[in-house]
Amino acid sequence: MHEIYNINELLVKDNISLKESLEILDRTGKQVLLVTDSNNKLSGILTDGDVRRHLLKNGKMTALIKDVMNMNYKFLPEEDIDKLEMLYEGSGYHHIPILDAKGFVIKLYTDNKDRIKVNNKNEIPVVIMAGGRGTRLDPLTRIIPKPLIPVGDITMIEKIMLSFYEQGFYKFHLIVNHKKDLIITYLNGLELPYQIKFIEEKKFLGTAGGLKLLEGMIEGLFLLTNCDVLVKTNYQSFINWHKTKNADISILGVKTKMEMPYGILNIDEDSYVTDIKEKPNYHHFIISGLYLIKSCVFKIIPENVEFDMDKLLTKARNKDYKVTCFPIEEGWYDMGQFSEYQKLLMHLKVLD
């Protein structure tokens, strides 16, 4: 954690409107406001994540900040500041104010996601498919594009980039389309420690067609991920696997168990029962939405045509490209559907 200096610019009264608070958030660029009551004592914290959650619930911009702020915040008395690191570890909170004996804010500490020290930078670029309509999260995505859906105090796409950045990746290519101006404006307004290049689709090209736009821009190996997939795995192990297999495409596969609630009959062509399995379990590997791909694959992607990933994988196999699966059993979250999105929020301890 680190200390945010000049906290005076972050102090606001609890009777200002949400619109005013957004203007201050935008001006300060700190993504957090310290809300005080009429006696100048801390009464809550407001982050841009709180604002997004309010708007997703059809909240009004005219609402007062005290009706939107988070009152369930963590703080430390000034005399207990030595307990800061212990409090932060595993708490799920990103901002911890320090209060004096009278309840006035004197300091603010944050986990400061944008200052994570990365000792070994990885030159392999990460491509994020961020152009879809996000129909599985409808009606939320009618208002906010899927990459900007909140996951705690940051957006879905920031959460994904952070997971890569923590392991040394810092070159990101974002293929955007649906509500792309919102995505570009939002991310350009942040002070981020990694590089972002926006690749704009002129029409919807499916889950793989947009990769054709990167031909001549990326040479060699790159990581590809959907913008609604969060993976907790060692990416270097994935890369080592890919290189050991001398693969052209490697799919991160997630082992899943499907429990059949009924007995299963196997019958022959004359309808005689040959086998009975009572409520069997089946194990499968599902496609996680994360891939390692060599740039030579670009040449088999049609230009300016809607083309999905399943078609690319099938075409690659038919043309004798080496396609492998790197198996994992846990640490995968599909944020693109409500049930899994809620599970992730529960895991992060940020569900309202």
Image (cartoon, grey):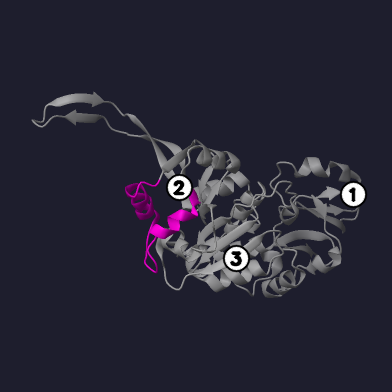
User: What's the mark number on residue 249?
Assistant: 2
Say which element carries label 1. Answer: helix
| Horizontal and vertical percent position of residue 104 | 87, 58
Residue 190 seen anywhere in this rendered image of the structure = yes
**Label whose residue precedes the other's in the sequence (2 or 3):** 3
**Label whose residue precedes the other's in the sequence (3 or 1):** 1
Nearer-the-camera pick, 36 or 124: 124
| Horizontal and vertical percent position of residue 315 | 34, 52
Figure quadrant of residue 187: bottom right
User: Which residue corresponds to the image point at 46% horizontal and 43% vertical from the top-left?
Assistant: 247
Nearer-the-camera pick, 288 or 70: 288
Callout 2, which amino acid?
Ile
Label 3 – label 1 distance at C-alpha: 43 Å
Callout 1, which amino acid?
Glu
Please say if the residues under marks 2 and 3 sit with CB atoms less than 8 Å apart: no
Label 2 – label 1 distance at C-alpha: 54 Å
Label 2 – label 3 distance at C-alpha: 23 Å
Tag 1 residue: 78
Residue 288's place in the image compared with 37, above or below, is: above
Tag 3 residue: 197
Residue 138 seen anywhere in this rendered image of the structure = no
Q: Which residues are magenta?
A: 292-321
